[in-house]
Amino acid sequence: MKKILLTSWRPAIAIALFICIWEFSTRIFQIETWILPAPTVIVMEMQEVLPAFFPHMVSTIRLVLIGFSIGTTIGIGVATLLHHYDKLRETIYPFLVLSQNIPIIVLAPLLLIWFGLGDTPKIIIIAMTSFFPITVATLSGFQQTDRELIHYMKMMGASKRQLFMKLELPHALPAVFSGIKIAATYSILTGVVAEWLGAQKGIGVFMTLASSSYRTPRVFVAIIITMLLSLSFFALILLLERMFIKWNREEIK
């Protein structure tokens, strides 16, 4: 904790300096608010719209949590399955890679046609975004288990289940949480983008309405809160990582 405090003052000063330059630049060059609002204008706008913005934020968080949970569960499950069956991994893995080359903007209309205008298409998009990094990271973690330890446990008569639960899974947890942290950050952004495609509530809807009416300060409010949500989600996963991987605490720091 002390180390974090000692190293965090540099980025804090850099952010404060950036905000000051931004504020003074908008005033000196008399930049119109609808083009680039000053930070003070954004703060005042945030105070004004926060009560109306709160339901949109809750809607986005709900979708993200559902989609992220589904993507995480399926990702870890698929990685475990591919780890135990080599031929299945050789067959399926290329399709996993190809699935990430399909742009969301192309896939989204198809999901809207197949599943309608409800929450289902958005949850699927978020789950797909979370699924790939978690699957790849988990599979990589399983494969990086020390071969000598595996050989030793086999010599001791350990079954495949014991080998997996006692050795491979614990050693893969750091890699698993690395994938989860990446997916957690992407899931918030994906949730907002998915709401652009059609929704009644959500940060994406709020942002679309604000940009279409040239209320740029409100767009910045949505951007800032989205960033804060992503950082908060990342911090939550980091906290869970510290709880579950106490034996690896020094590496996590």
Image (cartoon, grey):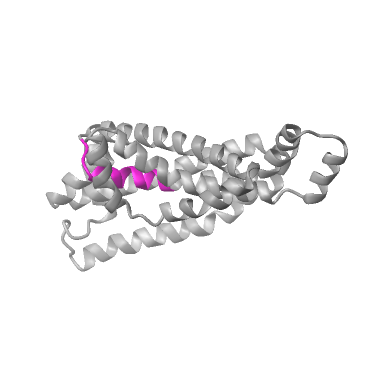
Residue 131, image x, y percentages: 47, 44
As displayed, is residue 119 above or below residue 183? above
Q: Return the residue nearer the eye: 177 or 228.
A: 177
Residue 75, image x, y percentages: 51, 41
Q: Main secondary structure of the magenta part?
A: helix
Magenta residue span:
186-199
Residue 127, image x, y percentages: 41, 40
**Relative to 168, is 31 on the left or the right?**
left
Residue at image position (38%, 62%) is 18
Residue at image position (57%, 52%) is 90
Quarter assignment of residue 121: top left
**Relative to 172, is 186 on the left or the right?**
left
Q: Is residue 1 visible?
A: no
Residue at image position (75%, 37%) is 163
Residue 184, image x, y percentages: 46, 43
Residue at image position (73%, 40%) is 247
Quarter assignment of residue 20: bottom left
**Relative to 152, is 144 on the left or the right?**
left
Work out which residue is located at the far left of the displayed protein and give it. 213
Q: Is residue 140 magenta?
A: no
In the rendered image, the quadrant that contains the N terminus is: top right
Q: Is residue 29 visible?
A: yes
Q: Return the residue nearer the eye: 189 or 136.
A: 136
As displayed, is residue 9 above or below residue 222? below
